[in-house]
Amino acid sequence: MVRAIRGAITVEKDERAAVFEAVKTLMKRIIGDNSLDAGDMIDIIFTVTPDITCAFPAAAVREMGIVDVPLLDMSAPEIGGALEMCIRVMVHINTDMSNAELRHVYLGGAAALRPDLAG
């Protein structure tokens, strides 16, 4: 069965090191919390808010050694009042887990996006 895991994290500044650290932290939590390995992953889609221009999140994932999974980076639309400096992710996986068993991960300021899941 194909399922999707969602997550998001904020960064303090638009710098490559900060973006890479945030992406790696987010992906490690998603992988760990859901007991995944790269073989379970179908694809990973990232969006970044318009104020993040220094790096592609996918490059951080490649640096983690995840090289055989298709990755896509996109820019989120600029919406007034939206959370700034935010990286969002959707990871499609092959799994026998139900939707209720999946662990979505919202870290840093992004916890405000889904307080029901951020615990």
Image (cartoon, helix red, strand yellow):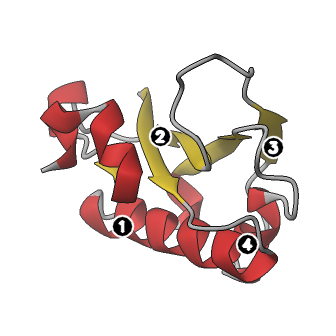
Give the left or right position of residue 14, taking residue 84 as reference: right
Ranked by sequence position, the earlier of labels 4 and 3 is 4
How far apart are the two marked residues, 4 and 1, measured between alpha carbons?
A: 14 Å
Which three-letter amino acid code belongs to the residue tagged 1? Arg
Do callouts 4 and 1 mark residues in contact (Cβ within 8 Å)? no
Which three-letter amino acid code belongs to the residue tagged 3? Asp
Do callouts 4 and 3 mark residues in contact (Cβ within 8 Å)? no
How far apart are the two marked residues, 1 and 2, measured between alpha carbons?
A: 18 Å
Name the residue at 30% across, 64% down: 35
Quarter of image, res 75 = top right
Ranked by sequence position, the earlier of labels 4 and 1 is 1
The residue closer to the viewer here, 27 or 95, is 27
Please name the residue that numbered disc 2 is placed on. Answer: 94
Ranked by sequence position, the earlier of labels 4 and 2 is 4
**Of tags 1 and 2, which is closer to the observer?**
1
Please name the residue that numbered disc 1 is placed on. Answer: 29
Give the position of the N terminus as an image quadrant: top left
Quarter of image, res 13 = bottom right
Please name the residue that numbered disc 3 is placed on. Answer: 73
Answer above or below: position of 35 versus 5.
below
Which three-letter amino acid code belongs to the residue tagged 4? Ala
